[in-house]
Amino acid sequence: MSTLPAILKDTKAHMDKAFENTKHEFASIRSGKASPTMLDTVRVEMYGTSMMMNQVATVAAPEPRVLIVTPFDKGQIKVIEKAIREAELGLDPVTQGNVVRVPLPSMNEQRRKELAKVIHKLAEEGRIAVRHWRTEARDKFKKLDGVSEDDVKHAEKDLQKLHDDAVAKIDAAMKAKEAEIMEV
Protein backbone atom coordinates (compact mmCIF):
# COMPACT_ATOMS: atom_id res chain seq x y z
CA MET A 1 0.00 0.00 0.00
CA SER A 2 1.53 3.30 -1.10
CA THR A 3 1.27 6.49 0.89
CA LEU A 4 1.72 10.09 -0.25
CA PRO A 5 5.14 10.44 1.48
CA ALA A 6 6.30 7.11 0.00
CA ILE A 7 5.28 8.20 -3.50
CA LEU A 8 7.05 11.57 -3.04
CA LYS A 9 10.21 9.87 -1.75
CA ASP A 10 10.23 7.41 -4.66
CA THR A 11 9.62 10.23 -7.16
CA LYS A 12 12.45 12.32 -5.67
CA ALA A 13 14.82 9.34 -6.08
CA HIS A 14 13.80 9.00 -9.73
CA MET A 15 14.20 12.74 -10.36
CA ASP A 16 17.64 12.71 -8.70
CA LYS A 17 18.60 9.78 -10.93
CA ALA A 18 17.44 11.73 -14.01
CA PHE A 19 19.64 14.65 -12.93
CA GLU A 20 22.66 12.39 -12.29
CA ASN A 21 22.15 10.76 -15.68
CA THR A 22 22.02 14.16 -17.39
CA LYS A 23 25.21 15.23 -15.56
CA HIS A 24 26.89 11.99 -16.68
CA GLU A 25 25.84 12.69 -20.28
CA PHE A 26 27.29 16.21 -20.01
CA ALA A 27 30.61 14.71 -18.87
CA SER A 28 30.82 12.85 -22.18
CA ILE A 29 30.69 16.17 -24.06
CA ARG A 30 34.15 17.50 -24.63
CA SER A 31 35.19 20.89 -23.42
CA GLY A 32 38.82 21.90 -23.82
CA LYS A 33 40.79 18.72 -23.27
CA ALA A 34 40.49 14.98 -23.70
CA SER A 35 38.77 12.93 -21.00
CA PRO A 36 38.21 9.14 -21.02
CA THR A 37 34.55 9.75 -20.11
CA MET A 38 33.99 11.41 -23.51
CA LEU A 39 33.32 7.99 -25.06
CA ASP A 40 31.01 6.72 -22.28
CA THR A 41 27.91 7.30 -24.39
CA VAL A 42 29.29 5.37 -27.39
CA ARG A 43 27.51 2.05 -27.96
CA VAL A 44 29.38 -0.72 -29.77
CA GLU A 45 27.55 -3.50 -31.67
CA MET A 46 29.52 -6.56 -30.67
CA TYR A 47 28.68 -10.26 -30.39
CA GLY A 48 25.10 -9.54 -31.42
CA THR A 49 24.39 -6.99 -28.67
CA SER A 50 24.85 -3.27 -28.12
CA MET A 51 27.50 -2.70 -25.43
CA MET A 52 28.93 0.35 -23.67
CA MET A 53 32.45 1.40 -24.67
CA ASN A 54 33.83 0.67 -21.19
CA GLN A 55 32.62 -2.95 -21.53
CA VAL A 56 34.66 -3.59 -24.69
CA ALA A 57 37.77 -1.42 -24.29
CA THR A 58 39.83 0.79 -22.00
CA VAL A 59 39.94 4.49 -22.83
CA ALA A 60 42.90 6.64 -21.83
CA ALA A 61 43.80 10.30 -22.37
CA PRO A 62 47.62 10.35 -22.47
CA GLU A 63 47.69 13.80 -24.09
CA PRO A 64 45.30 16.77 -23.83
CA ARG A 65 44.11 16.35 -27.44
CA VAL A 66 44.20 12.53 -27.96
CA LEU A 67 42.24 9.56 -26.65
CA ILE A 68 43.63 6.03 -26.91
CA VAL A 69 41.10 3.18 -27.03
CA THR A 70 42.50 -0.30 -26.33
CA PRO A 71 39.99 -3.07 -27.17
CA PHE A 72 39.82 -6.12 -24.90
CA ASP A 73 39.29 -8.24 -28.04
CA LYS A 74 41.83 -7.09 -30.66
CA GLY A 75 39.70 -8.70 -33.40
CA GLN A 76 36.95 -6.14 -32.77
CA ILE A 77 39.11 -3.06 -33.35
CA LYS A 78 37.36 -2.07 -36.63
CA VAL A 79 33.92 -2.38 -34.98
CA ILE A 80 35.02 -0.05 -32.16
CA GLU A 81 36.51 2.46 -34.62
CA LYS A 82 33.25 2.43 -36.61
CA ALA A 83 31.14 2.94 -33.44
CA ILE A 84 33.21 5.98 -32.43
CA ARG A 85 32.94 7.46 -35.93
CA GLU A 86 29.15 6.96 -36.04
CA ALA A 87 28.47 8.28 -32.51
CA GLU A 88 27.97 11.86 -33.78
CA LEU A 89 30.66 13.23 -31.48
CA GLY A 90 32.55 14.82 -34.37
CA LEU A 91 35.51 12.49 -33.87
CA ASP A 92 37.60 10.79 -36.55
CA PRO A 93 39.27 7.69 -35.03
CA VAL A 94 42.29 6.00 -36.63
CA THR A 95 43.43 2.42 -36.03
CA GLN A 96 47.15 2.10 -35.25
CA GLY A 97 48.26 -1.43 -34.50
CA ASN A 98 46.26 -2.74 -31.53
CA VAL A 99 44.76 0.61 -30.48
CA VAL A 100 42.37 3.20 -31.85
CA ARG A 101 43.76 6.76 -31.67
CA VAL A 102 41.10 9.43 -31.46
CA PRO A 103 42.59 12.87 -32.15
CA LEU A 104 40.30 15.64 -30.94
CA PRO A 105 39.59 18.37 -33.48
CA SER A 106 40.44 21.88 -32.40
CA MET A 107 37.51 23.74 -30.94
CA ASN A 108 36.45 26.43 -33.37
CA GLU A 109 33.44 28.69 -32.84
CA GLN A 110 31.15 26.54 -35.01
CA ARG A 111 32.15 23.36 -33.14
CA ARG A 112 31.49 25.05 -29.80
CA LYS A 113 28.01 26.08 -30.96
CA GLU A 114 27.30 22.52 -32.18
CA LEU A 115 28.32 21.13 -28.79
CA ALA A 116 26.17 23.73 -27.03
CA LYS A 117 23.18 22.47 -29.07
CA VAL A 118 23.96 18.89 -28.02
CA ILE A 119 24.06 20.02 -24.39
CA HIS A 120 20.70 21.75 -24.74
CA LYS A 121 19.25 18.56 -26.23
CA LEU A 122 20.62 16.43 -23.38
CA ALA A 123 19.29 18.91 -20.81
CA GLU A 124 15.85 18.77 -22.43
CA GLU A 125 15.92 14.96 -22.26
CA GLY A 126 16.68 15.29 -18.54
CA ARG A 127 13.81 17.74 -18.06
CA ILE A 128 11.48 15.37 -19.95
CA ALA A 129 12.46 12.54 -17.60
CA VAL A 130 11.75 14.75 -14.58
CA ARG A 131 8.34 15.73 -15.99
CA HIS A 132 7.61 12.05 -16.66
CA TRP A 133 8.21 11.18 -12.99
CA ARG A 134 6.01 14.08 -11.89
CA THR A 135 3.19 12.74 -14.08
CA GLU A 136 3.72 9.20 -12.73
CA ALA A 137 3.44 10.49 -9.16
CA ARG A 138 0.27 12.46 -9.94
CA ASP A 139 -1.30 9.31 -11.42
CA LYS A 140 -0.39 7.40 -8.25
CA PHE A 141 -1.91 10.15 -6.10
CA LYS A 142 -5.23 9.80 -7.97
CA LYS A 143 -5.32 6.04 -7.40
CA LEU A 144 -4.88 6.29 -3.61
CA ASP A 145 -7.91 5.42 -1.50
CA GLY A 146 -8.76 7.01 1.82
CA VAL A 147 -6.67 10.15 1.29
CA SER A 148 -8.29 13.56 1.66
CA GLU A 149 -8.27 16.06 -1.20
CA ASP A 150 -6.33 18.50 0.99
CA ASP A 151 -3.60 15.94 1.58
CA VAL A 152 -3.37 15.28 -2.16
CA LYS A 153 -3.19 19.06 -2.87
CA HIS A 154 -0.35 19.45 -0.33
CA ALA A 155 1.44 16.45 -1.83
CA GLU A 156 1.05 17.94 -5.31
CA LYS A 157 2.62 21.19 -4.09
CA ASP A 158 5.54 19.19 -2.67
CA LEU A 159 5.75 17.26 -5.94
CA GLN A 160 5.86 20.50 -7.95
CA LYS A 161 8.68 21.75 -5.71
CA LEU A 162 10.62 18.51 -6.32
CA HIS A 163 10.05 18.98 -10.06
CA ASP A 164 11.13 22.64 -10.01
CA ASP A 165 14.26 21.84 -7.96
CA ALA A 166 15.29 19.01 -10.29
CA VAL A 167 14.77 21.16 -13.41
CA ALA A 168 16.72 24.02 -11.80
CA LYS A 169 19.63 21.65 -11.07
CA ILE A 170 19.60 20.42 -14.68
CA ASP A 171 19.51 24.01 -15.99
CA ALA A 172 22.39 25.04 -13.70
CA ALA A 173 24.48 22.07 -14.85
CA MET A 174 23.65 22.92 -18.48
CA LYS A 175 24.74 26.55 -18.05
CA ALA A 176 27.98 25.49 -16.33
CA LYS A 177 28.82 22.98 -19.09
CA GLU A 178 27.94 25.52 -21.78
CA ALA A 179 30.25 28.10 -20.17
CA GLU A 180 33.00 25.46 -20.00
CA ILE A 181 32.61 24.73 -23.73
CA MET A 182 32.47 28.38 -24.82
CA GLU A 183 35.62 29.19 -22.84
CA VAL A 184 38.46 29.70 -25.31
Image (cartoon, rainbow, N blue to C red):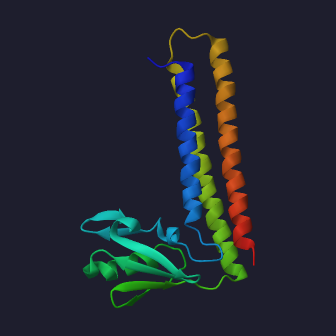
Rendered location of residue 26, percent (x, y) = 59, 62
Quarter of the figure with the C terminus: bottom right
Residue under the image location 33 percent in, 63 percent down: 50
Identified at 59% across, 56% down, the residue is 23
List x then y, in percent, for residue 69: 41, 78
When the figure is inspected, residue 108 is found, relative to residue 72, above or below; the finding is: below
The N terminus lies in quadrant: top left
Q: Is residue 83 left or right of residue 153?
A: left
Q: Is residue 137 above or below residue 132?
A: above
Q: Position of residue 114 (x, y in %)?
A: 65, 73
Dividing the picture into quadrants, the one containing residue 167 is top right
Most foreground residue, 67 or 107:
67
The answer to whether one can see residue 22 in this image is yes
Whether residue 86 appears in this view of the structure is no
Q: Residue furthest front?
A: 62
Give left or right: position of 125 versus 39: right
- Residue 132: image quadrant is top right
Residue 109: percent from the left, percent from the top? 72, 80
